[in-house]
Image: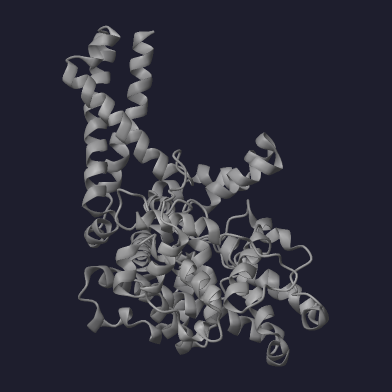
Amino acid sequence: MQRALYLIATLILLPMVVGPLMLAFGLERFELRPIAQLMGWTGVLVFGFLWCGALWLSLRTTRALLSGPPLSSLFQPRGALVLIVAWLLVAIWAAQWLLLSAPLNGVLQGSADTAQLRAALNRSEPVAAALAANKTPEQLYALQVMAARVRVDKPPVFAEHPFWSTLQRYSDKYAVDPRLLLYWAYSNSFWGEAEAGRVPFLRAMTPETFRDFVQVHLPAWFIEAGWRRWLIESGFFRRTFGDGLGTKLTYAVQKATYDVSMEPYETELYSDLFVVVRKYESEFPELSQAQTADPLRAAFRRSYLRIRADAVVDPCENAYEPPRRTAEYYAASRDDLIAFARAAFYLFELDFDFATRVQALVARHLEESFRQSLGEATWAQLSAEQRATLLGMLTDIYMPNIGHLGYNVYTAVELQCTPLSFVQAEASRDVDALLHATKLWRPANYEVLWSGAGNRLRLLSEVWSVAAGAPLAGFNPTETLADAEKLLAHELD
């Protein structure tokens, strides 16, 4: 029995030792500084302590497994017991922050009252002029709460590039509705695993950022594995676990690519960022030789130029027309596909100016696509609310393509680009309702967009009710401001 316990403990501890080592040896030099900026010194200390403790414990349990001493010897001398207890407490504390959308101790809530919060927000950056005009004090306060909820996840990032002025700058430059940019940033500030806000021992990472960091460091052997393709395309999960859980498991394996959804706008790395960088190259000075003294930007430029032609094929939503990439292609392009994804990830997470420029160009790209598919005359007749609804519902995935891989296993264009072609096709078939419906139009079978045309549009309606004075017709707004206020109050304590 004792040997079985030693074996179980060793099997649990060894991945905690080997996993970080594999990640560390796979890092590029340009990643070291961005990782330090995201984690901070406290994060390095916590992860260092956990790794050293896991190594020490695994050595003790392995030795015990081989020699078979009594279980009590594992906790001797007394100093070893203290270290084991301390390590377990830190491990549990860190794990529940990194692995749960809401920590076991609940989303942090402070004791600061509304008056204190209002006073603090009044001292912060003024609301962008385009959104502040003709607003009541309550509406201005709600806008400030939304902006503060975004900033609280990564305070150092917004200290360099203030939220409202950056949003206003690119809204003006690319003629993008600032309410859409606000919606994308605010919704992503608590979507997924970001509900609890910034992880307390990390400098600029939420649990969602941490998961995205892990995803953008998945090993190539996993991404390209034949058994991964089989799990996705064979229908194994659906046959074994049924349509509900089976679909979710298939999606989880299929989405485990380098096409990461990045904060602060939930922009897809290849399906969005790569597409607009290639379409609007003149808008990215990072691609200029003169701008690449920074190792991070140099890696971004170098890897992009090498995969520019074929990492994603235009138009992005045609996910099944190009031939599948071969082993020879991956052998030649693997390092650059990975380097581009990691460099883009760090730029997006740490440079709010870069992230907002990209997201504004994503909005511009989507609008241009709708203008082309619907025609200029039809697009011109649509209200601002309907245009925002069309763009806002594209945030999620196209579910019928779950279980059907696209041409490049490092991307997920078959899931994340295809909502655009689906909505365009449905809108083109239903132009009369699009133009004359009493409530805002969405596809009749909108459920295939997962939550993109459901709960997410209700959240857009909440943002719209604050930023425009009225909710979107036909979409009952969510009520998220109270939760945002509770989290912000903690920051004042």
**Residue found 39% across the figure and 53% down from its top:** 490
Where the N terminus falls, by quadrant?
top left
Please state which of residues 203 and 305 is positioned toward the viewer in this rendering: 203
**Residue found 59% across the figure and 43% down from its top:** 249
Please state which of residues 61 and 224 is positioned toward the viewer in this rendering: 61
Please state which of residues 211 and 94 is positioned toward the viewer in this rendering: 94
**Residue found 52% across the figure and 55% down from its top:** 483
Residue 3 figure quarter: top left
Whether residue 166 is visible to the viewer of this picture, yes or no, is: yes
Task: Report x, y in % for residue 116.
Answer: 40, 63
**Residue found 63% across the figure and 73% down from its top:** 465
Please state which of residues 211 and 250 is positioned toward the viewer in this rendering: 211
Whether residue 190 is visible to the viewer of this picture, yes or no, is: no
Q: Is residue 407 above or below residue 168?
A: above
**Is residue 418 found left or right of 56 in the rendered image?**
right
Where the C terminus falls, by quadrant?
bottom left
Colour mode of the rendering? one colour
Residue 400 figure quarter: bottom right
Task: Report x, y in % for residue 334.
Answer: 37, 59
> How many numbered discs, if any?
0
Residue 457 figure quarter: bottom right
Task: Report x, y in % for residue 338.
Answer: 36, 60
**Is residue 359 found left or right of 286 in the rendered image?**
right
Task: Report x, y in % for residue 44.
Answer: 23, 48
